[in-house]
Image: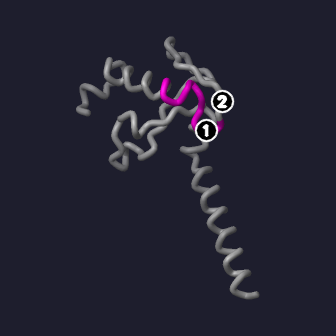
């Protein structure tokens, strides 16, 4: 997608947002909360955010396959690293279980 197509109000971008929203059933893909497309562009907590699975900074495209609908709270969690912290904790728990099996 070139720079012209990515502009915030471009028809292509709006179409992609709508398709992702419909695919995800109008719900946050992380917590399941109902979210809504915000036509007035007012900031509200239950506004549907489009989360890039592979961040744009890492080369992730603005495409249907790389976007997921999220609520405001989950979008913040993703970007504040809570998901990374959860994965790290689970990984440590698995390692600890493995270590205990070795010691037994």
> Is tag 2's residue or tag 1's residue first in the polypeptide sequence?
2
Q: Do labels 2 and 1 touch, CB within 8 Å? A: yes
Residue 12 horizontal side relative to residue 71, left or right: left
User: Residue 17, located in which quarter of the rendered image?
Assistant: top left
Report, in whole angstroms, how far the alpha carbon at label 2 lies from the one at label 1.
10 Å
Name the mark nearer the viewer: 2 or 1: 2
Which secondary structure, mark 2?
A: loop
Q: Residue at x 39, y 33 (%)?
A: 64
Furthest-bottom residue in this view: 103
Decide whether residue 33 is among the magenta residues. no
Residue 70 horizontal side relative to residue 63, left or right: right
Residue 12 in percent (x, y) is at: 31, 22
Residue 23 in percent (x, y) is at: 48, 28
The C terminus lies in quadrant: bottom right
- Residue 98's mark? none
Q: Nearer the viewer, residue 37 or 3?
A: 37
Q: Which residues are magenta?
A: 22-31
């Amino acid at each position: 997608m070139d720079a012209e197509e990515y502009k915030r109000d471009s028809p292509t971008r709006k179409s992609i947002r709508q398709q992702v929203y419909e695919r995800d059933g109008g719900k946050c893909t992380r917590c399941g909360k109902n979210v809504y497309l915000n036509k007035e562009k007012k900031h509200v907590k239950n506004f549907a955010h489009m989360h890039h699975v592979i961040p744009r900074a890492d080369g992730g495209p603005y495409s249907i396959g790389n976007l997921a609908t999220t609520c405001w709270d989950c979008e913040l969690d993703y970007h504040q690293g809570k998901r990374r912290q959860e994965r790290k904790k689970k990984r440590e728990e698995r390692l600890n279980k493995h270590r205990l099996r070795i010691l037994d």
